[in-house]
Amino acid sequence: MPIYEYRCQECHRVSSFLLLNLNEPFTPVCSKCGGHSLERLLSRVHVRLSEDTRLERLADPNAWAGMDENDPKSVARMLKRMGQEMGEDFPGEVDQLMEETMDRGAGESSIDTAED
């Protein structure tokens, strides 16, 4: 099923539309401002992956080769990417956690760890 992307000429937001029947007439409307002046974009192909495939990608050590666990920004990028792979949208939460961590200082942590 084709998904078409359009850019609004008024607010410049990109909107995606799933077309179930290509024989039906379709007039795109901007999802942000309701504008009718949209231009069709050439967009990337979206491939829907199974949950197993997404988990395998996350478990691959090569996927995290550039991540420095001592750098909060690097960890935040990893968490955002992990959320995208899992279909979760929590970038605001990651940003908030980053700010709280930076406010406490690099050497402190609010997470208690227990050793067995």
Image (cartoon, helix red, strand yellow):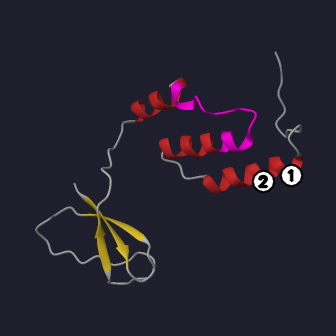
Residue 64 in the magenta stretch? The answer is yes
Residue at the farthest front position:
66
Q: Three-letter amino acid code at disc 1?
A: Asp
Q: Residue at x 14, y 65 (%)?
A: 22
Residue 8 place in picture, x, y as percent: 38, 77
7 in relation to 84, above or below: below
Query: Which numbered dot is residue 99?
Result: 2
Quickly name the residue at label 1. Answer: 103
Q: Residue at x 61, y 40 (%)?
A: 78
**Left or right, residue 19 beside residue 104:** left
Q: Three-letter amino acid code at disc 2?
A: Glu
Q: Residues within 10 Å of mark 2 (few under 14, many from 20)?
A: few
Marks 1 and 2: CB-CB under 8 Å? Answer: yes
Q: Image quadrant of residue 74?
A: top right
Residue 24 place in picture, x, y as percent: 14, 71
**Left or right, residue 89 beside residue 43:** right
Q: Residue at x 32, y 58 (%)?
A: 43
Residue range in magenta is 62-76
What SS does tag 2 mark?
helix
Number of labels in the image equals 2
Residue at the farthest top position:
116
Residue 46 in the magenta stretch? The answer is no
73 in relation to 50, above or below: below
Query: Which numbered dot is residue 22?
Result: none
Q: Residue at x 67, y 53 (%)?
A: 93
